[in-house]
Image (tube, grey):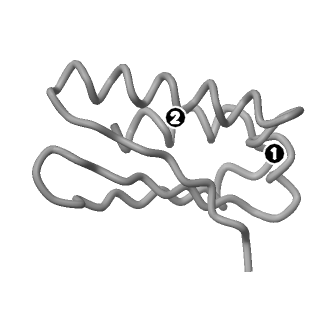
Amino acid sequence: MRDLVEYIARALVDDPSQVEVRQERLGGNRVRVELHVSKQDMGRVIGKNGRVANAMRVLLRVAAAREGKQATLDVVDPR
């Protein structure tokens, strides 16, 4: 799941070296994936009205469901 999010994010952004994905188990079959990108690439990852980010969330949920898990994606605001 982490690899899927990283692959999509690297394809979208101008600076793929700034893409960082962290995966955390929340207990049971729940997983949280955090996506970190540079400040300049936030707009590309989020998209208009959040459409790109929501599409990534849907793909992540489908991939997680295939493994019998539940996953959420958080796009973290750069510092």
Residue 70, by quadrant, is top left
Q: Which residue lies at the image location 77% right of the left edge and 36% below the top edge?
A: 50
On screen, residue 57 above or below 20: above
Q: Is residue 55 left or right of residue 44?
A: left
Question: Label 2, on which residue?
Answer: 7
Under mark 2, the amino acid is: Tyr
Residue closest to the far bottom: 79
Q: Which residue lies at the image location 86% right of the left edge and 46% below the top edge?
A: 43
Label 2, residues with CA under 10 Å away: few <14, some 14-19, many ≥20: few
The percent coordinates of residue 29 (x first, y second) are: 15, 44
- Residue toward you, 33 or 70: 70
Question: Label 1, on which residue?
Answer: 14
Under mark 1, the amino acid is: Asp
- Residue toward you, 29 or 13: 29
Tell me how far mark 1 sits from mark 2, CA to CA: 13 Å
- Residue toward you, 24 or 38: 24
Label 1, residues with CA under 10 Å away: few <14, some 14-19, many ≥20: few
Circle 2 SS class: helix
On screen, residue 8 above or below 72: above
Q: Quadrant of the N terminus?
A: top left
The percent coordinates of residue 71 (x first, y second) are: 35, 41
The percent coordinates of residue 47 (x first, y second) are: 83, 35
Residue closest to the far left: 28
Q: Quadrant of the C terminus?
A: bottom right
The percent coordinates of residue 59 (x first, y second) are: 47, 23
Q: Which residue lies at the image location 37% right of the left edge and 54% below the top edge?
A: 32
Residue 3, by quadrant, is top left
Q: Which residue lies at the image location 49% right of the left edge and 46% below the top edge?
A: 73
Circle 1 SS class: loop
Q: Tell me whether circle 1 and circle 2 mark residues in contact (CB < 8 Å).
A: no
